[in-house]
Amino acid sequence: MAMQPPIKSFGEERARERNPFSQKGFLSRTSLRLLLLNYEYPPLGGGAGNATANMARELAGLGHDVRVVTAAFRGLPRLEKADGFEVRRIPAVRRHADHCSPLEMLSFMASAGAYLPVMAGAWRPDACLAFFGIPCGPAAWLLKRLRGTPYVVSLRGGDVPGFQPYDLAGYHRLTAPLIRFLWRGAAAVVANSRGLADLAAASAGGVPIRMIPNGVDAARFAPAGELSREGPVRLVFVGRLVRQKGLDVLLEALARLPAEACFEVEIVGDGPLRAELASLAGRLGLAAKVRFSGWVSRADMPETLRRADAFVFPSRDEGMPNAVLEAMASGLAVAATRIAGNEELVEDGRTGFLVPPDDPAALSAVVARLVADRNLCWRLGRAGRDKAVGEYSWRVVAEAYAALCREAVR
């Protein structure tokens, strides 16, 4: 059996030194021109888009000259400046804010491949950070080929062979050779969780995989000032309404709760399964207790979480979910599946509960404990807040990526 390449853990490197590259002097005060490339950026997409926005803000706060290149979408400005960085939206075919088809990704890939070398001729970025090997990697590779700009690939899940095999197996069979080619050309390949790094290493063909986790804005996502003891226990889910997120399992779990259980559930998000899931909730007798709220703006998300007592996340596959980190920072107990990403965030019995994926009986049992004991929700939520604030910071994440880019330039 071929030996897998080593995984360089962000946590292990930080144990050596607060900043993993400071001993070698890679982080001088000289700023870099950094290009962040992602076909999704708020309000488009989910966790990867939000990660891009947070990292851009923190990199700009560190003194770097930052540009984000992303896909245009109806009504959004082509050029936007905020938080010390610039967002440029380039033409691409996209019909929905929450998801994107392979053909629509190809349209962004082609548009970025034509646009980046032209933009780089005047601005000359020092390094490119490409979120997702596909569809962003090919344009980053072309930029390197034509302008000599090194690139770092930030893996997010769907761009890793073996992730979501029930949906993406055929896609990965077609794209795996291109994915490995793009990884070989990168200055660094980074996964956002240990589990995703392990999965990437299995097909990396000798390319070392680093690990830098996601962060959370603990100032924006904070607990409510006063905790209410009135009314039903409030559960919330945030994410796309797709098979990956396991909402069918959640509804089956809720239907198993005792008749006297006093709770309500808000499902925040949208996607192709919304009508099907609403129909399932009706058939299971949950229509009065489950509310499908659709997408909530990023500005309103902190308040949405503060209204809840606990967060439910029955996903089947994840990298490192921003939604769970934001719930923890908001002081919510978390009931989640024991999968990569979740199990690195949620400490079973201390900050929430972990159950096997696709197991409605196990999920129902832990939700029943939360619904029956609001004090338990608050106790777990306080511990989760402490963990999120103490261990996950977008500033530290940005410093680590900036160090990789500086290393690539040198």
Image (cartoon, rainbow, N blue to C red):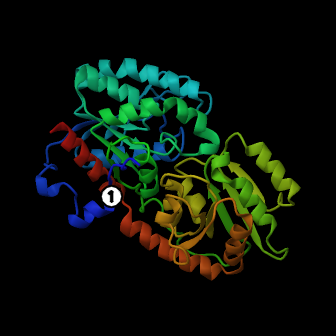
Q: How many marks?
A: 1
Image position, residue 404 (x, y; %): 25, 46
Q: Is residue 330 shown above or below 147? A: below
Residue 76 appears in view: no
Image position, residue 294 (x, y; %): 68, 47
Q: Where on the picture, by quarter, is residue 53?
A: top left
Residue 338 appears in view: yes
| Crowding near the residue tagged with mark 1, few <14, some 14–19, many ≥20 C-alpha atoms within 10 Å | many
Q: Is residue 302 shown above or below 184? A: below
What is the quadrant of the C terminus in the image? Answer: top left
Residue sitting at the far front: 1
Along the line of sight, the residue nearer the viewer: 153 or 7: 7
Q: Residue type at mark 1?
A: Ser
Q: Is residue 53 shown above or below 113? A: below
Image position, residue 191 (x, y; %): 40, 49
From the viewer's perspective, tell me whether residue 368 is left or right of residue 137: right
From the viewer's perspective, tell me whether residue 175 is left or right of residue 20: right
Image position, residue 256 (x, y; %): 80, 68
What residue does disc 1 label?
9
Q: Secondary structure at mark 1?
A: strand
Task: Residue at 71%, 79% (x, y): give it.
Answer: 372
Task: Residue at 39%, 21% (x, y): give it.
Answer: 113
Task: Residue at 73%, 43% (x, y): give it.
Answer: 273
